[in-house]
Amino acid sequence: QVQLVESGGGLVQAGGSLRLSCAVSGGTNSIYTMGWYRQAPAEQRELVASITSGGITNYAGSVKGRFTISRDNAKNTVSLQMNSLKPEDTAVYYCNRRHPFRPADTYWGQGTQVTVSS
């Protein structure tokens, strides 16, 4: 059974940094696209960043230049380095794994809270 477990969330002041990590168990990650999504209260879940099996990255415009996604296929992990955090980055952050050609083959982590104080 595939499980995604996030870690690294917390409370930080505006301008600070956090690093989120997601460990995947129950299968190999190498062919999957990995991503980070976030959901603020009363908002829809949105894509923050994704990285394909080939290392192609995609970022939401609001985080481009501040956040960096990376993956380690040998360790089955994906990380999100978040710098220059803003109060509007406050949300629950979710790790996501999806098959590039089978949309139903998608898994989510339980989420980790990131709170940025002004």
Image (cartoon, rainbow, N blue to C red):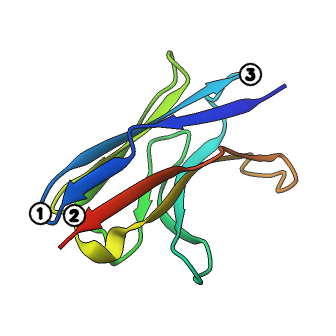
Q: Are marks 2 and 1 in contact (CB under 8 Å)?
A: yes
Badge 3: how crowded within 10 Å, few (<14), some, or many (20+)?
Answer: few
53 is higher (above) or lower (below) than 39: above
Query: Is the N terminus in the top left, top right, bottom left or bottom right quadrant?
Result: top right
- Name the residue rendered at 26%, 46% in the picture: 18
Between disc 2 and disc 1, whose residue precedes?
Answer: 1
- Name the residue rendered at 14%, 55% in the picture: 16
> Residue 62 location, x and y as percent?
32, 77
Tell me the CA gap for discs 1 and 3: 36 Å
For disc 1, the marked residue is 15
Of all residues shown, which one is farthest toward the top? Answer: 74
- Name the residue rendered at 23%, 71% in the picture: 86
For disc 2, the marked residue is 85
Q: Secondary structure at mark 2?
A: loop
Based on the displayed image, in which of its 4 quarters is residue 19 positioned?
top left
Query: Is the C terminus in the top left, top right, bottom left or bottom right quadrant?
Result: bottom left
For disc 3, the marked residue is 27
- Name the residue rendered at 79%, 52% in the picture: 101
Left or right of 118, for residue 48: right
Amino acid type of the residue that numbered disc 1 sits on in the rendered structure: Gly
Amino acid type of the residue that numbered disc 2 sits on in the rendered structure: Leu
